[in-house]
Image (cartoon, rainbow, N blue to C red):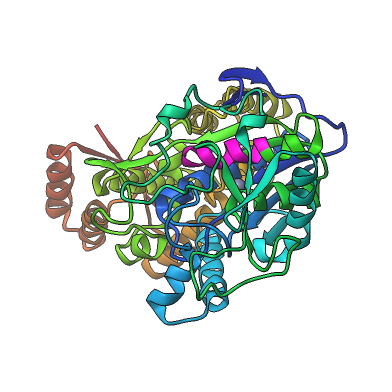
Amino acid sequence: MKIYNSASRKVEDFVPNHPDILKMYTCGPTVYHFAHIGNLRSYIMEDVLEKYLRFSGYNVKRVMNITDVGHLTSDADEGEDKMLKGAKREHKSVMEIAKFYTDAFFSDCAKLNIKTPDVVEPATNCIDDYIRIITKLMDTGYAYFAGGNVYFDTSKLERYYIFNDYTEDDLAVGVREGVEEDTNKRNKNDFVLWFTKSKFEDQALKWDSPWGTGYPGWHIECSGISMKHLGDDLDIHCGGIDNAFPHHTNEIAQSESYLGHKWCNYWMHVHHLNTNDGKMSKSSGEFLTVPLLEEKGYDPLAYRLFCLQSHYRKSLVFNWENLDNAMKTYNKLIGRVAALTPKGEAVDEEAVTALKQRFDNALGSDLNTSLAITALYDVLKYDTNEDTKLKVIADFDYVLGLDLIKKADAKRETEKKQKAVEGEFTVIAEDGSSDPQIEEKILARQAAKKAKDFASADAIRNELKAAGIELTDIPHGVKWKKI
Ligand SMILES: [Zn+2]
């Protein structure tokens, strides 16, 4: 597979470190609020990556953290604690908030067919791991104690900025306006590893440490959790583009200083979901969540398809019209798969190989999901039997996660029931789509024919023809198409 590595800023061949295991790490959610569908775009694309790697034969072990402590409203250690903010807003305890929004996150993921990683670890479970890392960083001079907190000293590094060409002067980035500068820091880039002098008197969660009672900084948790479950190296680390700086930059700084060698080989960043008027945020307009999509009548998997239709390294514009289009495409796709019926024929292995090659070429080129969708349409058009097509679609859908087989089976069942009601008469569209208005007219024509009212039957046929619909009588039914 070829993948764009944000660390080298090049498309590279993906070569894992070990023959028997592929180590993948994903930054998880800060569970103080519902997940925004923009954040879920990252999890969808990471899910496709994981499943494609498994489809390609790799033994993937994927780990994800749940941030339930230490993440301040600014990613650069400033502002209020996000968890505490959530707890205050809802008059609940921090742990109640964490539990509620962790459950909500996984409920969204299930609806979007995002597989739960092999290991999901709440940050509050690994305090000893952070203390071990910070202790060594203190001992080796990479960290210092100032004003009650432990900071990482970025001036000790030969190269701090990995994903961009910032200089210290650019550091307005990542720091919110109106937030007081932390004068304890020796360098602007320095970041907190351990807070003891909490800015918040009522900080709910505190632990003992060699530097006093306090709590970990946000960045240290991903290094600690990754090393706890995946050891001293990592093949691929994923996250939203927002996380590249300062979060991932700081993860690399502390991990490599602690380990004394390179930590992670590949970095994958998923770009923003934007609205028409700019970047999405919780403060602008509607707060878009999976339950809101459902409330408005959209299948969450139509949103998944919408995300797959474009490349993860491009910003994606979300509006309701775009989602409507994705929904239509999704329904049509299910209709076309439902139009294929298993007949128990032998699978055409040659066709399977040829079709899989196209799919593999698409996803193997820096996870080109829109090309993978094209490869899916190629299956529908391919000159082979329907059993073969259904087998290949099932294989592809393991990666794409659109529930195509399941939904097509359900659609076929419904059609069967409909047929039982209407007798031995079926109405099908040549492209597998459905249109209740047209179907109703065709059924009315059939009723007229049955009553030997051929004039009315012909009138309906002509009316449809004038609207660009052509009918073909087939045994026990009618096939229609748009001309
Ligand atoms: Zn992280």
Q: Vertically, is 68 above or below 38?
A: below
The answer to whether 368 appears left or right of 283 in the picture is right
Q: Is residue 73 left or right of residue 140?
A: left
Q: Which residues are magenta?
A: 240-253
Taking depth in this image into account, of 433 and 320 the one nearest to the observer is 320
Q: Residue at x 36, y 51 (%)?
A: 179
Q: Nearer the viewer, residue 366 or 405?
A: 366
Give the residue at x 56% y 27%.
161
- Residue 149 percent across, percent down from the top left: 61, 55
Res 335 seen here: yes
- Is residue 244 a member of the stretch shown in magenta? yes
| Residue 428 rendering spot, x and y as whole percentages | 37, 48
Above or below, comparing residue 198 to residue 241 in the picture: below
Number of marks drawn = 0
Q: Looking at the figure, which quarter contains the C terminus?
A: top left
Task: Indicate the quadrant containing the N terminus: top left, top right, bottom left or bottom right.
Answer: top right
Which of the two residues, 379 or 221, is positioned nearer the viewer here? 221
The prevailing secondary structure element of the residues shown in magenta is helix
Percent x, y of residue 480: 31, 42
Tell me, yes or no, if residue 52 can be seen here. no
Nearer the observer, 302 or 182: 182
Left or right position of 437 against 125: left
Residue 175 magenta: no
Q: In this picture, is 16 found above or below 103?
A: above
User: What residue is rendered at 49% in x and 64% in y?
Assistant: 199
Place of residue 301 in the rendered image (x, y in percent of width and height, measured from the top left): 46, 52
Question: Looking at the rendering, which quadrant does residue 353 occupy?
Answer: top right
